[in-house]
């Protein structure tokens, strides 16, 4: 079988059947970008390599849990990567001060070996998300950036911003709701 011709979803179906070559193909496609995501948050090559390995181990173990109707494979994969990186960040920085990373740096996940078509799609998706994020009120955007791009918990955000936890939770909920609606309308818009 020539796995390089398979879609991500077809490879995942093969992984459900315990096909190691399918996992290897997905690893070759996405490991650099998963590593980049982790490295931008951790700034530690060894830890980022470990996170990357853990992410693909998770793909191997949880392949059957992916539901195609709920989103793209890459969304699922990078969600796993993001959560695993946040876990590592929390473990490494428990009790230490952290600074919020610039959202532009975090979302710039492109690597030198990404194909031009893939880069164009990713840049388009990045621009769409960035535009929707910038349309949010400052208070809502700040808590979302601190949570998703800085790795802070809601309690930590409340402490850093010197705001009640309930206020942070409300801003997060409202901001995510607006972001979801904005992205849904942008993705449904007909292409010219």
Image: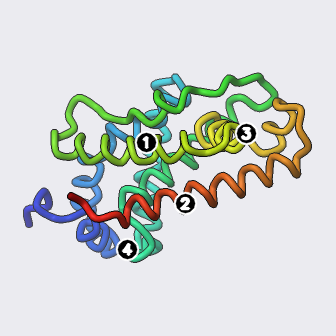
Residue beneath the point at 26% across and 67% down: 19
Instruction: Identify the mark nearer the N-term, 1 or 3.
Output: 1
Q: From the viewer's perspective, is the residue at label 3 or at label 4 nearer?
A: 3
Above or below, comparing residue 27 to residue 69 in the picture = above
The residue that disc 1 covers is 52
Q: Determine which residue is flagged by label 4.
A: 68
In three-dimensional space, the C-alpha distance between marks 4 and 2, rounded to whole angstroms, equals: 19 Å
Helix, strand or loop at label 4? It is helix
**Measuring 46% from the left and 64% from the top, which residue is drawn there?**
184
Of the residues under marks 4 and 2, which one precedes in the sequence? Answer: 4
Which numbered mark, 2 or 1, is in the foreground of this view?
2
Q: Residue at x 68, y 23 (%)?
A: 99
Residue behind mark 3: 139
Sequence-wise, the earlier of marks 3 and 4 is: 4
Distance from the alpha carbon under mark 3 to that under mark 4: 34 Å
For marks 1 and 4 on the same chain, the one whose residue lies earlier in the sequence: 1
Identify the residue at horizontal 35%, vertical 73% (top origin). 16
Disc 3/disc 2 C-alpha distance (Å): 17 Å
- Circle 2 is placed at which residue position? 180
Secondary structure beneath dot 1 equals: helix
Residue 151 horizontal/vertical position (percent): 65, 38
Q: Upstream in the sequence, badge 3 or badge 2? A: 3
**Image quarter of residue 41:** top right
**Residues at marks 1 and 4, CA–CA distance in whole angstroms:** 22 Å
Local secondary structure at mark 2: helix
Q: Secondary structure at mark 3?
A: helix
Which label lies toward us, 1 or 3? 3
Judge depth for marks 4 and 2 and give the one in front. Answer: 2
Find out whether the residues at labels 1 and 3 contact each other: C-beta distance under 8 Å: no
In the image, taking residue 72 as reference, residue 92 lies left or right, namely: right
Left-right relation of 16 to 91: left
């Amino acid at each position: 079988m020539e796995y390089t011709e398979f879609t991500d979803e077809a490879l995942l179906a093969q992984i459900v059947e315990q096909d190691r070559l399918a996992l290897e193909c997905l690893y070759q496609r996405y490991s650099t970008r998963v590593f980049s995501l982790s490295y931008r948050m951790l700034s530690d090559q060894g830890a980022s390599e470990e996170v990357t390995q853990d992410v693909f181990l998770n793909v191997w173990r949880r392949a059957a849990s992916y539901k195609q109707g709920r989103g793209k494979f890459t969304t699922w994969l990078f969600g796993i990567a993001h959560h695993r990186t946040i876990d590592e960040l929390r473990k490494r920085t428990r009790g230490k001060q952290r600074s919020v990373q610039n959202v532009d740096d975090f979302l710039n996940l492109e690597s030198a070996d990404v194909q031009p078509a893939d880069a164009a799609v990713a840049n388009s998706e990045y621009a769409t998300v960035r535009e929707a994020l910038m349309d949010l009120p400052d208070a809502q955007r700040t808590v979302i950036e601190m949570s998703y791009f800085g790795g802070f918990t809601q309690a930590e955000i409340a402490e850093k911003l010197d705001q009640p936890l309930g206020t942070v939770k409300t801003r997060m909920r409202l901001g995510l709701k607006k972001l979801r609606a904005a992205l849904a309308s942008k993705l449904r818009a007909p292409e010219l």
